[in-house]
Amino acid sequence: MSLVRRARPEDAREVLRLRQVMIDAVSPHPAAGSWHDRSLPTLRERLADPAGPFAAFVVDHPERPGALAALAAGTVEYRIGHANNPTGAVGFVFSVATDPGTRRRGYARACVVDGLLTWFRERGAGKIQLTASAEALPLYESLGFRPKPDPLMELVL
């Protein structure tokens, strides 16, 4: 039996805590956590919508009731189809994190494999994309992810 479950609205604060753990590992910011209260209502709303394009999968912390040990979150978006993905459904993994005290137990891998990848398949996603930290590369490579040559560009509004 898998330890992974779909995150619920009442998990929202812990989901934000683990997202902050991931953000701090990649790009620490002096205002870390200052955005959580503003983000909380929207996250709760998204977690309450099982048919929506967003999902988060978690493992409960084994020693701290009410806390989470790991998180994997993502979305499914529609792009006009093409030969390699006729339906146009694309999955994006954007938040995978493990509580520092529960690392090296396979929790993040389980959240990705038993949670997100299964969810993406059920929604017909023909490809899955993500941005990986150097520390996370071995996990994603072991799951079959490969780097793309396409350069990513971004505009912040």
Image (cartoon, helix red, strand yellow):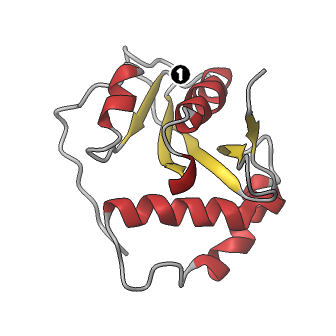
Q: What residue lies at 61% left-to-right and 35% top-to-bottom? A: 111
Q: What residue lies at 49% left-to-right and 21% top-to-bottom? A: 126
Q: What residue lies at 69% left-to-right and 53% top-to-bottom? A: 68
Q: What is the crowding at mark 1: few (fewer than 14 residues within 10 Å), some, or many (at least 20)?
A: some
Left or right of residue 39: residue 155: left
Count numbered badges in the picture.
Answer: 1
> Closest to the observer: 126 or 56?
56
Q: What residue is disc 1 on?
A: 87
- Look at the image and tell me whether residue 99 can be seen: no
From the top left corner, tell me how far across and down residue 125 is, in percent: 55, 25
On screen, residue 107 above or below 22: above
Find residue 3 and report its image quarter: top right
Q: What residue lies at 73% left-to-right and 58% top-to-bottom? A: 67
On screen, residue 149 above or below 36: above
> Closest to the observer: 6 or 54?
6
Left or right of residue 45: residue 87: left
On screen, residue 76 above or below 38: above
- Look at the image and tell me whether residue 115 can be seen: yes
Amino acid tagged 1:
Thr
From the top left corner, tell me how far across and down residue 9 is, in percent: 81, 59
Find residue 41 and report its image quarter: bottom right
> Closest to the observer: 105 or 12?
105
> Closest to the observer: 20 or 151?
20
> Looking at the figure, which quarter contains the C terminus?
bottom left
> Looking at the figure, which quarter contains the N terminus?
top right
On screen, residue 154 above or below 84: below
Mark 1: which secondary structure? loop
Left or right of residue 43: residue 18: left
